[in-house]
Each structure stands twice: as structure tokens, then as C-alpha cells.
Amino acid sequence: MRAGAGGAADVVRKPRSRAGIEWHGERVDRLDPEVCYRALRTRDARFDGRLFVGVTSTGIYCRPVCPARAARFENCRFFTSAAAAQEAGFRPCLRCRPETAPELATWRGTSNTVSRGLALIADGALDGDASVEALAERLGIGARQLRRLFDQHLGVSPIAVAQTRRVLFAKQLIHDSRLPMAEIASAAGFGSVRRFNETFRQLFRRPPSALRRRAIVALPEGSVAATGVTVRLRYRPPYDWPAMLAYLRARAIDGIEQVIEQLDGERYVRSVAHDGEVGLVEVEHVAERESLAVTIRFPCVRALPAIIARVRRVFDLGADVASIGAHLAKDRLLAPLVARRPGLRVPGGWDGFELAVRAVLGQQVTVEAGRRLAIQLVRACGAALPAQRGRSSVAHVFPSAAQVAAADLSRLGMPRARRHALGALAEAALAEPRLFEPLATVEDTVARLCAIRGIGEWTAHYIALRAAREPDAFPASDVGLLRSAADRKGVRPSAAELAARAERWRPWRAYAAQHLWAADSEPLTGALR
Ligand SMILES: [Zn+2]
């Protein structure tokens, strides 16, 4: 069982690498005030998202890039998260808007449990009636231990993280959307409009509506399903958007998702199912603002945080690729690849079950053949979107585990053994809805997946990499990886040799894999091998 596993691993495991702590030669875990103040004085964008400054004379906290004049050194207090600044009694600045800072997940990566806890909180795990005890149980540890880990790694409690998220997300919706206040309260996970108003009055000394620009006229309640809400999600540059789109385009399942060409660039559109409702998500790159613009058309605003969390996962928005790249580039094999694609991200799966199905369909066939099988599967058992919600090109949702389990798969053009694997996967997902969430270590996650009939080591690592978002997953036996890791004479390593070499790429082996795959999919240039 998973109970206890997460906690034990956190206690005994030393950080595998300092990559997540040391960064651009500056150590930020200890928050050296001199370094922090220098970042503030120079408005150093590299610190955006990992450093927040609270000013004791004003009671306001800012991003390091705030256009306001820097406060005096003795009035500054420094924090590594907005939640910590807020818990210390500071309120968010209305000029630099801390809610728009890039949200970095992986650099806090010394504790898997904390990272997973943050991801679950982002999904709404502490909204409504949910308790820290229930969250801790999902993570396989006790509530006290969870609080201790949060305090140790983030300097705040899980509740404070959730509370800050709610306030900042609500503030973003007030500024950027036309949602009515009652729906913002609901979307941000406040139990009631009264709680929402109280929290804002306490924090900003005015009601939430006073924070909204006059030019913004709220829409009638319930109209979001048709008009959509657009939010901007910032990332830490660089971001290789063409590589991300190319990945998605090559695997796009007709009817479910599409990359649409338009005059000013391309955007990605897909259908989304959540808690029995269905809708549509569109994602565009806004390079000059270092962000993605995400438009969500969904009947229920409560689903917004969970949908946004998925977008973050799919587009790998939380990665600090500069730090990861610096770590990987220490290896001769990877250095030229990282130099060539400094902004490369690891695309994630939209949904655990969907991704696992894709992995099984892709076993031992090309990407294109796997894609065609997925299209067949959607035609056989995917549900149609209501006409007013879909588009002509995206009109279906990916089938659920129950639909796949009940479907006649004999018409799919693939070997019987793989059809059985698909059925076993659907049964396993029905029996354990959290099957695709990460466990304490990547090894635990892989072992649980390998217990499913028809899922081998390669598939399990692939699912861990894309669905569980394990930054250290590495399917060492992958043909593309072996080909890409060949020496100058073209001699490929064995899977065991590649796995041995990859030890030094920890804890970012998934990023190494992505770089190797990217290099493999382009014409050989010789010099790079
Ligand atoms: Zn500010």
C-alpha cells in the first residue's frame, strides 16, 4: 500500500541534486538578503516567481520586477512564495500583481511529497469542505508530517498556500475577465460570496468589486459557457513554443484536439471533460508577455482551477528550464542539444487515463500509427460534445475508462494482446481512479503501473513521464532515445548502458529524454552526435 511510503522517503532521502536549489550561481533557498535586495534594485526578472518582497512600511508585497521604487533595505522582508508573504501579513501589490508571476513548481523539487501536495492544492484539494487530513491521506502521510514538510520546504502551511491561491486567482479574474463577482468567488474556491468579500476586505481594505477597472463590465451570470474566460499564464522564459506545438500536432486526435493555423500564429484547441461536464479549451502563445493565453468555455466556473492546472501540466509551465538545462549541459552528450533548444519543455498528458491509452496504442508502432489507432478508438466509443459547445473540428471528448471497458475493441486494427492490455488498463483505472497520480518516488509509480497486464517498463516510464509528470522518469529502452544517444560511429548504447549514463541526469531525466527525442526526430547532422 502507499500509506507511509511518501513520508518515509522524504525523511530518509537526501536531495538528489542541488540543481533545484542553486540557481544562476545564486543560492536562493537561504534567501541571502543582500542577494535578494540586489535583485530587487536591478528588477532582475530571473528572480520573478521565486522571490517576493514584503515592505514593512507599507504592508504590501511585490514581485522583484515591480515598477514601483524599491523600498529601503531595512524595510524589506524576503519570501520564496506569495503564500509566505501573505501569511506574514503582507497584501499583494496592485501594480506588479504577484498573481501574475510565473509559477515555478520544479525548483522546489527536493521533496516529491511537497510538489505533489502543491499540485493537488492547485487542483482544488483544499477548497470547499476538504481538509488537510484528507490531502495528507492522498499523499500517503499524516497531516502533521505534511504540515512539517510544507513548513520546512516552503515556510508556510498547506492551508495558507490554498488561501493565497484562492485570493490571487480571484484577483486575476477580477482584473482580466468579465465574470460577475459571485462566479469569481465560486471559481476561486471560496465557500461563499460572504467569505470572498470578507477575505478581500481584510486584505485590501475594500470590497472585491472596487479592484475591478471601470472599463470592465461584468457579464450576466451563467454566460461563461458561451463566451469563455481568458486567463494569462506566465512562464519563465525561454519557452520553445514551436517544439511544443509540433509535439501536439503530430499526436493530435481528430475530433478531440487540433492545432489551428491563423494569421498571427497558431493555437491549440481541445475538448475537455471534468466532473461529468464538457467544454473547450484554446491555448495561444503571447510571446511578448511571456505567457500563454488560455480561453476556457465550460458550463461550470468551479472547474476553472482544475482545468488551468491541467493546462499548466500539458504545457509544462512550471519548469525552470534554465536551471534544468544548466544541470543537463554538464554532460557532453546533452550540452549541444540543450544549447540548441534552451526552451524545450516536457509536454504532459491532458488526462492520466487518456495518456495511458495513448501509450498502449503507441507500443511498438510509429507516432502516426498510434495516432490513427487513437482516432479509431474515439470514433468507436468517444462521446459527442453538445453542438453549441463544440466546433466543427473538435466535437468529441476522449472516452472514459468506463466507456473503453464497455466497448467492443475487436474492430481496432491491432494485435489481440494489445487489445487486452487496453481492456486491462481500463479496468485498472476504474478500480483505482488515482492510478496515474505519482507516488513517493518514480520507482514506486512505475512499479504500480507495471502491475497492470500488458504494461511493461517502457510504457510505465512513459506514463510516469507524461501523465504523472515525473521529472525524473526515463524510458531507457526507447528506440528513439537509444538512437539519439549513439556515439560518433553510430553505435547505440544498450538500454542498461543508457540508464547508467542517465544516473547523472537525475532528477531531470525526463528533460534529458525530451532533448534526445527532439534530436532524434530531425535529420542527422553528424556534428551533433
Ligand atoms: Zn509591486
Image: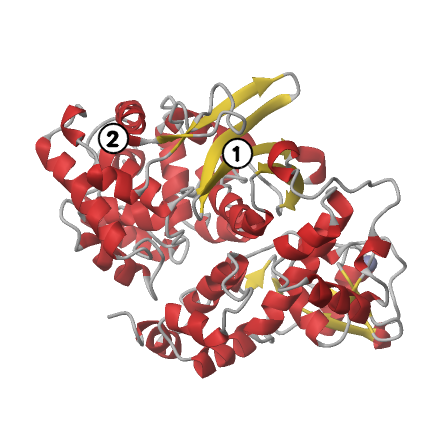
Residue 271 image point, x, y percent: 47, 33
The quadrant of the image that shows the N terminus is bottom left
Query: Label 1 amino acid?
Result: Leu
Query: Closer to the camera, 374 or 223?
Result: 223
Residue labelled with disc 2: 490
Q: With 56 as the anchor, is 446 left or right in this view?
A: left
Q: How many marks?
A: 2
Picture quadrant where residue 42 is located? bottom right
Single out the residue that lies furthest toward the top.
263
Label 2 residue SS = loop
Label 1 residue SS = strand
Q: Is residue 331 above or below residue 190?
A: above
Picture quadrant where residue 217 is located? top right
Single out the residue that lies furthest toward the bottom.
144
Single out the residue that lies furthest toward the front.
221
Q: Residue at x 44, y 41 (%)?
A: 273
Mark 2 and mark 1: span between their CA atoms?
45 Å
In the image, the residue with mark 2 has its CB under 8 Å from the nearest atom of ligand 1:
no
The quadrant of the image that shows the C terminus is top left
Residue labelled with disc 1: 280
